[in-house]
Amino acid sequence: GAPRRVLVTGAAGRIGRMLRPRLAGPGLVLRLLDVREQEPAGPGEPVEIVRAELGDADAVGRACAGVDAVVHLAALSGEDRWEEILRVNVEGTRTVLEAARLAGVPRVVLASSNHAVGCYRDDAAGSPVAGGVGGGVPAPHGPDGVPADAFPRPDGYYGWSKAAVEALGSLYADRYGMTVFALRIGACFDRPPGLRGLDTWLSPDDCARLVSACLTTGVTGFRVLWGVSANTRRWWSLAEAREIGYEPRDDAEAYAGTVRATEAERRTSGLLGGIFCDWPLGEPW
Ligand code: 15L
């Protein structure tokens, strides 16, 4: 049946704060975990606030007790030192998956990123302005765009950690029969941030729709899905996410007249991962 209590890690982060008012409601209690301080529950708001860090496996285990699913968002969200990426993104995800398994939680949604596949190049878009990278590799093309499960071609340690997180999810699905959805999220902001966002935007409402679909679908096992809105300029396939019931309603094209190229975009590599492909490995973003 539909989940009634869901643990959200990284609940104080950008996406966690977007999901809180959109998912919590009658029939769905959110248990919001973050290492940072959070807004206390409002009157009648169906949320439970938990302050804990992923390094505290006991606390994460307690937070998993009695939930029907986990939405794991807690992570470093850009390039960082190798040791930190390993500790927070990789070990943190393993802690969450292990806690979910031990608590008998059947379903986990993992925040992956487009940067797990950032070194793909769009041949249709012409030759990239390669800065420091070898120009990328041609992206595979499915019937609706770059397939959601295109083999990882990370564009930094951060993107690599997201590919590692996807593989951890598949391991837990295959070995323990858990259902794990890894979302290759595009640019999830209130509005498309810069020109690239016209292609990669995931609106906050569509993000909630996608996570909802992951929580309620009858599809089981491991799947990688693109987290993107129905953008006119979209390069990535929505077919896989639609299969589990995601129906995006937003299109970044509505902002085409107002969005400007950011300073960083003028230096971009032209690859799927944008400026991440030019950023020095291991240098904090
Ligand atoms: C990501 O993975 C980052 O976490 C986010 O902050 C954005 O930069 C996004 O990718 C993007 O590609 O726009």
Image (cartoon, rainbow, N blue to C red):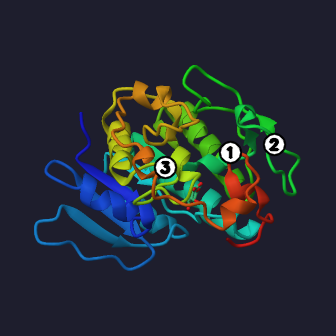
**Label annotation for residue 136:** 2
Does 74 appear above or below 245? below
**Label annotation for residue 218:** none
Write the residue at 71% across / 40% down.
Answer: 152
Task: State which quadrant residue 236 falls in.
Answer: top right
The answer to whether any part of residue 233 appears in the image is yes
Indicate the amino acid at tag 3. Answer: Trp
Q: Nearer the viewer, residue 64 or 111?
A: 111
| Mark earlier in primary sequence (1, 3) | 3
Q: CA distance from mark 1 to mark 3?
A: 13 Å
Does 27 appear above or below 138? below
Other residues around mark 2 within 10 Å, as few (<14) / some (14–19) / many (≥20): many
Secondary structure under badge 2? loop
Write the residue at 22% across / 47% down.
Answer: 4
Looking at the rendered image, the quarter that the C terminus falls into is: bottom right
| Mark earlier in primary sequence (2, 1) | 2
Task: State which quadrant residue 128 falls in.
Answer: top right
Looking at the rendered image, the quarter that the N terminus falls into is: top left
x and y, in percent, of residue 111 in the image? 51, 51
Q: Does the CB distance between marks 2 and 1 fall below 8 Å? A: yes
Q: Is residue 34 left or right of residue 77?
A: left
**Label annotation for residue 272:** 1
Q: Is residue 145 left or right of residue 178?
A: right
The answer to whether any part of residue 101 appears in the image is no
Secondary structure under badge 3? loop
Q: Is residue 213 left or right of residue 170?
A: left
Furthest toward the left, the residue is 44
> Which residue position is annotated with label 3?
201
Q: Nearer the viewer, residue 155 or 138?
A: 138
Q: CA distance from mark 3 to mark 2?
A: 22 Å
x and y, in percent, of residue 106 in the image? 39, 39
- Number of callouts in the render? 3
